[in-house]
Structure formats: C-alpha cells, structure tokens
Image (cartoon, rainbow, N blue to C red):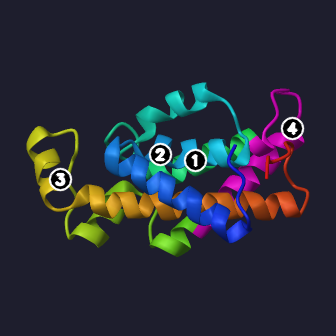
Amino acid sequence: MPKTSSREELLATIEQEALALEKQYHGCSRCVLIPLQKHLGLANDNVACASAPLAGGIALSGNTCGALLGGMLAVGLCVADNDLENGQAFLDTMGASFRLMRRFQKEFGATTCRELQTERLGAYYNMASPDEYKAFVKAGGYDVCSTLVGKASRLAADFLLEMSDEGLLRVKLAV
C-alpha cells in the first residue's frame, strides 16, 4: 500500500483514484470501494466484485446511490463481525452506516441516484434504457458522477479514519 505524508494527502489520493476509476471504468459502488480497500488496507477483492450490481442506484434502477453503498460496504468491512451472534457488532454497523448516510445526504443533498442526477444534470436518465444511457453520456453524466464518486470515497475514508481515531472499528486500518 502506498504511504502518504498526511491525512489530507491520503484523502486527496483516495478521491482522485475513485474519480479516475469511475471516469474510465464506471460502476460507482466499486469505484468508491476499491481505493478505500487499497489505501486503508481493507483487502477483499470479492467485495469489490460483489459491489458491481449496486451501481446506478442498484442495478441501474435509480434508487440508493451506488457511491453511498460502496462507502457503506467499507463500513461493514471495518465494523461488522462474521460472528452472527455478535449482536453488538450488527448494531454498531447499522449505527455507523446511518451516520455515513446522513453525512452523504448533507454533503450531496440526496441519497438516490435519481435525485442526484436530477439535481446535477437537470433530468434523470434511466441508464438501463439504451437511448437514455446515450443521453446521460451526452449530458456529461460520467463527468458529474465521477466527481461525486471521488468526493463520496473521500467522505467515506474520512469517516472511517475518524472512527478509527475514536477506537470504534473492529479492524485496524493500514495507515
């Protein structure tokens, strides 16, 4: 894992990598998650693969933003426990995810792909429709979403670093 000289540099690196991944490859959920995994030491490639269908507001449906869901998956990797009998870990994960969702909502004004697109592009484009997908691309959708993905990844990283500073994670971050 590349070492950075400061927290701000780490956050900027995560933001820029997420933005670049979304711009080049698409898939907001995985593009948020991959830099978090890489730079915070949350190694589990299968989670990034499993996050792919969450893009575009869950399978291109316009529902909960995939960028938010990618951040929540990182929270789960840090706070949840494989032991299903650990009810406290479940409650802690739900509480942390709720707080991340509220930060996301405060930062971006909404939590759904549909609302975020409408606010930023002036319309919602159903990306499951080939014609609307073309209109989304023509309207600069990937430029808008790439910026949001970068900022969402940074927001999630900052949130996890704060939780780590407070001793609230079940895993140690590699920073």
Q: Which residue: 75% across, 55% down?
A: 95
- Mark 3 or mark 2: which comes first in sequence? 2
Image marks 4 and 2: residues in contact by CB distance under 8 Å? no
The quarter of the displayed image where residue 47 is located? top right
Residue 5 pos. (x, y %): 73, 65
Q: Determine the secondary structure under disc 2.
A: helix
**Gap between marks 3 and 1 measured at Cα:** 24 Å
Other residues around mark 3 within 10 Å, as few (<14) / some (14–19) / many (≥20): few
Residue type at mark 2: give it.
Cys
Q: Determine the secondary structure under disc 3.
A: helix
**Gap between marks 4 and 3 measured at Cα:** 44 Å
Q: Determine the secondary structure under disc 4.
A: helix
Q: Label 2 belongs to which residue?
A: 31
- Tag in front: 4 or 1: 1
Taken as a whole, is the magenta stretch helix, strand or loop?
Answer: helix
**Gap between marks 3 and 2 measured at Cα:** 18 Å
Residue 87: assigned label: 4
Residue 11 pos. (x, y %): 63, 64
Q: Determine the secondary structure under disc 1.
A: helix
Q: Label 1 belongs to which residue?
A: 35
